[in-house]
Image (cartoon, rainbow, N blue to C red):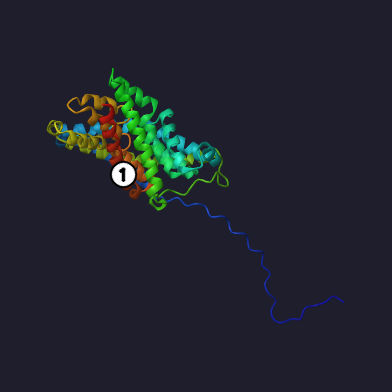
Amino acid sequence: MPRTEPRTGAAAPVTAPAAAPEPPVPVRSATPALLGRAAFAVPVAAGAVVLAGGRWLDSPALSAWRTVLVAVALQALPFLVLGTLLSAAINAFVPAWVFRRALPARPALAVPVAGAAGVVLPGCECASVPVAGSLIRRGVPTAAALTFLLAAPAVNPVVLTATAVAFPGSPEVVLARLLASLAAAVTMGWLWLAFGRPEWLRMRPPATGPRPGHSRLEEFRLGFQHDFLHAGGFLVLGAVAAATFNVALPRTVLEEVSGSPWLSVLFLALLAVVLAVCSEADAFVAASLTGFSPTARLVFMVVGPMVDLKLIALQAGTFGTGFAARFATATAVVAVVCGVLTGWWLL
């Protein structure tokens, strides 16, 4: 006879085995995208008011502010698009092991290699920020990625050629810019190794390859859309700040400080930060500042591609405001010191 179990109570309900929990999907905060859209919308709305407003808005100062704002934004926009395209392509198509094999295993040696890579890879500061963020997410040591971020827009062939054209018959200026900028970038990389803390970086979750249901092309599209909206909003904010400083700065100040060697160096360093001129064009601005010493003009060209208002805004949007404040301050000091020492030696 078949064996039966004793009845001890009501039969337990039969239930299907519990389904395995789905792996968590990284949640991207909506704040960056909203901030990007808002940063685009506010200047656009302001521009519409200015264009449609009354005569009280049509003043020379406001006209100059509009001109500088549009010039800075349009000058940087193509390079920002290029940078976000490269960033999205790296996240979607390039395996992490490629970068680990391309750089030395020791971070202290990877830093100067990353700086040298900037010499052969043309790029603007607006493009270097999203690319550096993508490199960090793909496993590149932070110090090496930050070194590349600073070196690429400062020492690439396009910038050096523009410097040679702006200073004809002065190859020592080109050499001084190359050495001072490379020294500043590598020094900042080593300083990050010594004193940097990972918690200072506030980045979105790392890309880990295509998610279920998403092809690599879809990941590329989504990554580009996210990074462009994220960084583009901060670019506009930086352009607004640069335009405001350009209009508010009295031109008579230039004449007052040019006679003092130290004041002229510090003033042109500050001017490089607030003017936010693209690195491919800043040599022509420096060449026009004939009342200042060669060392002061060199400092202008070294500081500008590494620290300016739009670049600080982009870094804040990519890595966090805490990082941007610390990194921009330290970079400005190191760039000024490297520019002064190199100018004293070569110029």
Residue pictured at 24% horizontal, 30% vertical: 295
Location of residue 212 with respect to 347 vertically, above or below: below
Of the residues shown, which amino acid type is indicated by label 1?
Ala
Q: Mark 1 points at which residue?
A: 330
x and y percentages locating residue 96 in the rendered image = 53, 41
Question: Residue pushed farthest front?
Answer: 345
Task: Count the marks.
Answer: 1
Q: In this view, does 195 lie to the left or right of 266?
A: right
**Tag 1's secondary structure?**
helix
Give the position of the N terminus as an image quadrant.
Answer: bottom right
Question: Residue pushed farthest right?
Answer: 1
In the rendered image, which quarter is residue 145 located in? top left
Q: In this view, does 199 lie to the left or right of 63?
A: right
Give the position of the C terminus as an image quadrant.
Answer: top left
Q: In this view, does 108 lie to the left or right of 274?
A: right
Residue pictured at 33% horizontal, 23% vertical: 162
Location of residue 284 with respect to 96 vertically, above or below: above
Choose between 216 and 208: the one closer to the eye.
Answer: 208
x and y percentages locating residue 294 in the rendered image = 23, 27
x and y percentages locating residue 332 in the rendered image = 29, 40
Location of residue 279 with respect to 145 vertically, above or below: above
In the rendered image, which quarter is residue 174 located in? top left
Residue pictured at 41% horizontal, 35% vertical: 115
Res 266 seen here: yes
